[in-house]
Amino acid sequence: MNVDATRGRVLTDWRPDDSRFWASTGRAVARRNLWISIPCLLLAFSVWLVWSVVVARLPAIGFDYSTDQLFWLAAVPGLSGATLRIFYSFMVPIFGGRRWTALSTASLLLPSLGVGFAVQDPDTPYAVFLLLALLCGLGGGNFASSMANIAFFFPRAEKGNALALNAGLGNLGVSVMQFLVPIVIVVGVFGTIGGEPQILADGSRLWIQNAGFIWVPFLTLTAIAAWFGMNDIADARASFREQSVIFRRKHNWIMCILYTGTFGSFIGYAAGFPLLMKTQFPDANALSYAFLGPLVGALSRAATGWISDRWGGGRVTFWTFLGMIVAVLGVLFFLPGGGSGGSGNFWGFFACFMGLFFLTGVGNASTFQMIPEIVRQEVPRLIPDLDSNSSRVQSERESAAIIAFTSAVAAYGAFFIPKAYGSSISLTGGPEAALWVFAAFYAVCVGITFGYYTRKGAPVPC
């Protein structure tokens, strides 16, 4: 390793599965990188989905947009974030985890400042808001590179829990944002520097610009911490061509489907939850409760990684999808016009959605635990000529690339779920059609999980 393994920026000798190395040096270095990575990822999620709260306030400050236009603004960051994840998936082995984490975190200053300035001008065109929503997708891209980076640092026995912590506590950024933004927009946090408030019809004042400005100091600090406190791993370096082997791996594409069912649901529900509550239950104070859904999902992901390490990711994923079907049916029952009565039942609806968020978190952890195990079994079969060390290195590279790539595909849920709500409401008058499609997709995921990973004699048991 470098002269000092705990300080060297590039780790030239990294053997986390060597128990002596891990105990003497590896664990401390890996944990330092993890605990810097988490706040960077948390802020990335905060910026990525900030429009889920901002859109609900735009009509109050003079922006006259239709419901479908508002759902577009909530959905567009998911589209750009998911697309950027495809490219971010391969950046850590090319540029190094430390350098890429610092630069990608600093890039979020652009949409944060842009949102802060744009909402202060009532003449800001809708096209500008769409552009800023697209730029917020930079935060969505960060997840792919962050997870790929952390996957390199930990041994197989602890990888599931480490990834669950990074992702779960990072996912908390959605909840933190949905809790914090409604507070800071009613206070002149930055004084005259932050701009004048918007005066509402009832005479009250809002500082919507704080929804963007509040992240600027934190992004600056975490980008600096990543640059000076994290490490690059020499063995993790690989060209795009070396990583692109995953596109020939059948299980890469299967796990894309399953992770779309878990993380795609989590991020899509988080993006559309505030506006869905506001449209279906207008008398409920939606922004006061919206943060609880992502909070439950993020905490359940962080807290349940060990379950998959112990009982098997495939088994946990199978039961999670069954539970999600039941939860969606509950949401349908409590919607206005559902089985609970004409006006619906807000608290029943809310409770079922909390169940959905909880299950998406459990499934997020379990599907990511499955990937390294699947690759560990598949690489020796697909490349039998590799010795044990080369097989381990190849497995680590493929696992990291698949984790990142599946997260890219799944992130499209942040676009499709809010857009499905908007389209369903426009075409049928309610979100029920979209929810039925989601339930059917989960049923497909149950069948895939059972057929490939959990049945007796499954091709890759895990």
Image: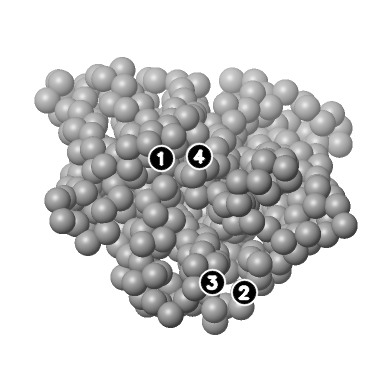
> Which disc is residue 91 wearing?
none
Q: Is residue 193 left or right of residue 351?
A: right
Q: Compared with residue 255, is residue 177 higher up or lower down, i.e. above or below?
A: above
Image-based side of 32 in relation to 244, left or right: right
- Residue type highlighted by circle 1: Asp
CA distance separating discs 2 and 3: 14 Å
Of the image marks 2 and 3, the number of the one nearer the N terminus: 2
- Given the image, on which type of amino acid does mark 2 rest? Ala
The amino acid type of the residue labelled 4 equals Asn
* Residue 161 - label: 4
Instruction: Write down the residue under mark 1.
Output: 309
Q: Position of residue 295 (x, y in %)?
A: 49, 29
Q: Is residue 43 visible?
A: no
Query: How much space separates mark 4 and mark 2, taking CA atoms?
Result: 25 Å
Q: CA distance from mark 2 to mark 1?
A: 28 Å
Q: In the rendered view, would you say 286 is above or below 62?
A: above
